[in-house]
């Protein structure tokens, strides 16, 4: 069992390394040394989180990753609202982790060990919910997602990339480690997360800000991950890890492309970003590809993750399967809305071309090509 968990940690560590490589590429040549040091600290904490064998060590490194992330939002955010956004992010995630710390200390004293493999069976519903609360906030599940849109919108491009691609996956990895057998509590959490996922998709369809839409789409995608991991089946576990990898790469690429558009147009409003296909014809190709991958269009790793998910959910409950189908439909709707509202329509700009650098094309393609290659593995 321990080897099984560590294999998922290895996959997420590989995802972290790839995303941090892209983050380093996206830095400007005149970036401050403190900015690079903050990113390096964050990568070290994430590396330690995914490789530790102790639950106490996992908790410590899990929480230490908050520090450089808050520094990124506070120090290099775009708007004055970055201060309340960092407060939301810090206190939501920190306070929700305190019950987990108490339970880790209690179980460690009972078992005289803090190794990961003694976890797995929580007969008490309250204890089970308190254990997974921290991870549900980090993912996040709907109703615990208040910190996510503001943190994404106010963070710099590297902050948004690491939040979507890696920090949300810490919650997923934590749920893997504490998969319980409390069916009553799991069913309640499943119902809440799927209903909230559908509502998040409807919120996406009402957004007027490109970055906010991508941020809210993470809540919808993580609903799949939560449900798949709580089902605790073979196909469900495969679905959840594939969904986390595909979402990590897709969302990172979409946030980067939205940043490129913002640096040219100086707006993230759908009203002003119309007809970008005439302004950035090559970048819009990657925008189209990532949008289609994000909606699970075959052949993509997201498509196969949804296939494995439905194999697992049909054996669980027909109502949950119906909600999952509705969630998939609305996920496709907001992805089409995201692409069509930005790439097409009447342009408000006189110029028909705005140049992009080779580095921006390279980073966009490096986000897209791995998603295509992973299908053949």
Image (spheres, grey):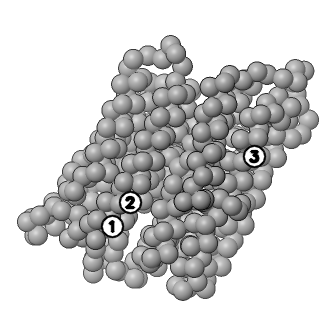
**Which of the two discs, 3 and 1, labels the residue nearer the N terminus?**
1
Image quadrant assignment for residue 219: bottom right
The residue that disc 3 covers is 288
Image quadrant assignment for residue 61: top left
Where is 274 relative to 310, above or below?
A: above
Asked if the residue at tag 1 contacts the one at tag 2, i.e. Cβ–Cβ closer than 8 Å, the answer is yes
Residue drawn 53% across and 75% down? 191
Where is 238 relative to 137, above or below?
A: below
The residue that disc 1 covers is 4
Residue 318 located left or right of residue 277 = left
**Could one spot residue 245 in this view of the protein?**
yes
The quarter of the picture where the C terminus appears is: bottom right
Which of 83 and 13 lies nearest the eye of the viewer?
13
Query: Few, some or many C-alpha atoms within 10 Å of disc 2 (few <14, some 14-19, many ≥20)?
Result: some
The quarter of the picture where the N terminus appears is: bottom left
Q: Where does residue 201 sit, x and y in percent of width and height?
A: 67, 59
The residue that disc 2 covers is 8
Q: Where does residue 126 sit, x and y in percent of width and height?
A: 31, 73
**Distance in Å between CA atoms under marks 3 and 1:** 36 Å
Q: Nearer the viewer, mark 3 or mark 1?
A: 1
**Could one spot residue 251 in this view of the protein?**
no
Which of 195 and 27 lies nearest the eye of the viewer?
27
Image quadrant assignment for residue 264: top right
**Which of the two discs, 3 and 2, labels the residue nearer the N terminus?**
2
Q: Where does residue 34 sit, x and y in percent of width and height?
A: 38, 20
């Amino acid at each position: 069992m321990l080897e099984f968990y560590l294999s998922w940690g290895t996959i997420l560590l590989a995802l972290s390394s790839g995303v941090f490589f892209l983050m380093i590429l996206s830095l400007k040549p005149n970036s401050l040394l403190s900015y690079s040091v903050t990113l390096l600290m964050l990568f070290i904490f994430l590396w330690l989180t995914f490789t530790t064998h102790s639950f106490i060590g996992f908790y410590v490194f899990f929480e230490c990753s908050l520090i450089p992330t808050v520094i990124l939002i506070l120090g290099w955010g775009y708007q004055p609202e970055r201060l309340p956004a960092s407060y939301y992010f810090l206190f939501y995630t920190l306070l929700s982790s305190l019950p987990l710390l108490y339970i880790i200390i209690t179980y460690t004293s009972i078992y005289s060990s803090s190794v990961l493999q003694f976890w797995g069976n929580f007969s008490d519903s309250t204890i089970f919910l308190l254990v997974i609360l921290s991870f549900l906030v980090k993912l996040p599940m709907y109703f615990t997602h208040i910190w996510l849109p503001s943190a994404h919108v106010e963070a710099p491009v590297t902050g948004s990339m690491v939040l979507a691609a890696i920090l949300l996956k810490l919650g997923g990895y934590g749920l893997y480690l504490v998969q319980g057998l409390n069916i009553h509590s799991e069913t309640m959490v499943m119902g809440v997360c799927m209903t909230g996922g559908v509502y998040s998709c409807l919120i996406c369809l009402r957004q007027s800000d490109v970055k906010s839409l991508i941020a809210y789409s993470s809540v919808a995608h993580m609903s799949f991950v939560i449900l798949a991991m709580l089902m605790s089946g073979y196909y469900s576990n495969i679905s959840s890890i594939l969904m986390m990898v595909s979402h990590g790469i897709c969302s990172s690429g979409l946030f980067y492309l939205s940043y490129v558009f913002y640096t040219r147009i100086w707006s993230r409003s759908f009203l002003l970003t119309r007809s970008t296909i005439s302004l950035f014809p090559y970048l819009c190709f990657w925008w189209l590809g990532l949008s289609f991958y994000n909606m699970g269009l075959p052949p993509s790793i997201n498509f196969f993750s949804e296939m494995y998910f439905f194999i697992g959910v049909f054996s669980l409950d027909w109502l949950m399967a119906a909600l999952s189908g509705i969630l998939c439909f609305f996920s496709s709707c907001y992805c089409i809305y995201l692409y069509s509202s930005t790439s097409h329509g009447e342009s408000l700009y006189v110029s028909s071309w705005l140049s992009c650098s080779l580095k921006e094309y390279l980073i966009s393609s490096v986000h897209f090509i791995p998603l295509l290659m992973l299908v053949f593995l």
